[in-house]
Amino acid sequence: MDRNISTFKQLCEYCVSSKKNIYEIAQYNMAKEADISENEVRNVVMNALKSMKEAISIGINSNELSVSGMCGDDCYKVKKFYNKNHSMFGPLFQKVIEYALATSEENIRMGKIVACPTAGSCGILPAALISISEEYKYNTDDQLNALITAGEIGRIVSAKMALAGAVAGCQAECGVASAMAAAAITQIRGGNIYQILNSSALALKNVLGLTCDPVAGLVEVPCVKRNPFMAVFAITASELALSGVESKIPIDEVVDAMAQTGALMSPMLKESSEAGLATTKTGLYYKSLICKK
Ligand code: SF4
């Protein structure tokens, strides 16, 4: 197998010519690069999956605020609401929202999370993948295959550009997480290579230009609440792709557009907290309160 797959076009061509799935190619290449067996690769991914589930189960039962006091009880509020009211979109939607908040809030409490691809975007992939796996009873192997697929999406994007708000805004963190989540769900639901890559392209296109302007420089506002939104976007992208809807712009070009957009974005909107939400009257008020602590 080719260890030097650096574009989605190459990945797609190789999947087609070898009649293999993305996860098969990715796990083979990971094993070869790390000089371990493919089973050992799957064990590493299994540990990540377990950590994702642990973060959800701890986070969903906590309403402890972060040190700043800005965040930490949103999942609790949502859970309380859903105890009495059902989501108009049904139980799966409820789970997605709760799991994304639970994980993201574990991050701001300094709990253990899996950065996928970053800590600020850590709730998106687990929320989408684990809630769907629970609702539709996908087994562990299916979940591992989906997670490896998502990882390969993140790997190829990160080969082209750094996945950091400081480099390209939140499109490179929450946006890429949404693209990874879309690929994971499309894989687990039996989508083919074209549908998987289309789902990622559709998810990523949806967030091009998203800035990174965290209040007080903390990965809390708007980060925590951005996670459930992005998880839902990922499911939308996956369902569009599974229906045969195509991204007119191929995923490689969407990534190029993201890199270009990031380069054109003002440094004031790239994690420096010098503009946007961070410098609103209320954003500055929270910052002054935190500075006094
Ligand atoms: S707003 Fe910035 S810090 Fe927050 S998740 Fe997005 S990229 Fe990360």
Image: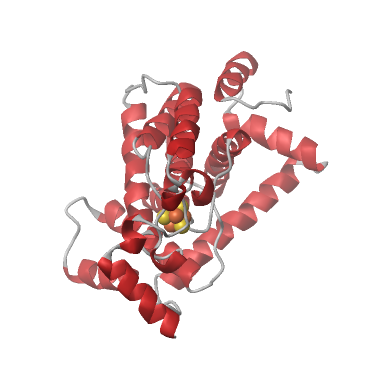
**Residue drawn at x 71%, y 26% as measured from the top left:** 4
Q: In the displayed structure, does residue 44 sit left or right of residue 241? A: right
Q: In the displayed structure, does residue 181 sit left or right of residue 90? A: right
Percent x, y of residue 47: 63, 57
Q: Report the front residue among 270 and 222.
A: 270
Q: Report the front residue among 269 and 214.
A: 269
- Image quarter where ligand 1 lies: bottom left
Q: Is residue 140 above or below residue 195?
A: below
The N terminus lies in quadrant: top right
**Residue drawn at x 83%, y 41% as measured from the top left:** 35
Percent x, y of residue 255: 49, 30
State the residue lying farthest toward the bottom: 293
Quarter of the view holding residue 189:
top left
The C terminus lies in quadrant: bottom left
Residue 50 showing in the rendered view? yes
Q: Report the front residue among 268 and 124.
A: 268
State the residue lying farthest toward the right: 35
The colour mode here is secondary structure
Percent x, y of residue 134: 41, 53
**Residue drawn at x 50%, y 61% as measured from the top left:** 53
Residue 73 showing in the rendered view? no
Percent x, y of residue 171: 43, 43
Q: Is residue 272 above or below residue 16?
A: below
Q: How many marks?
A: 0
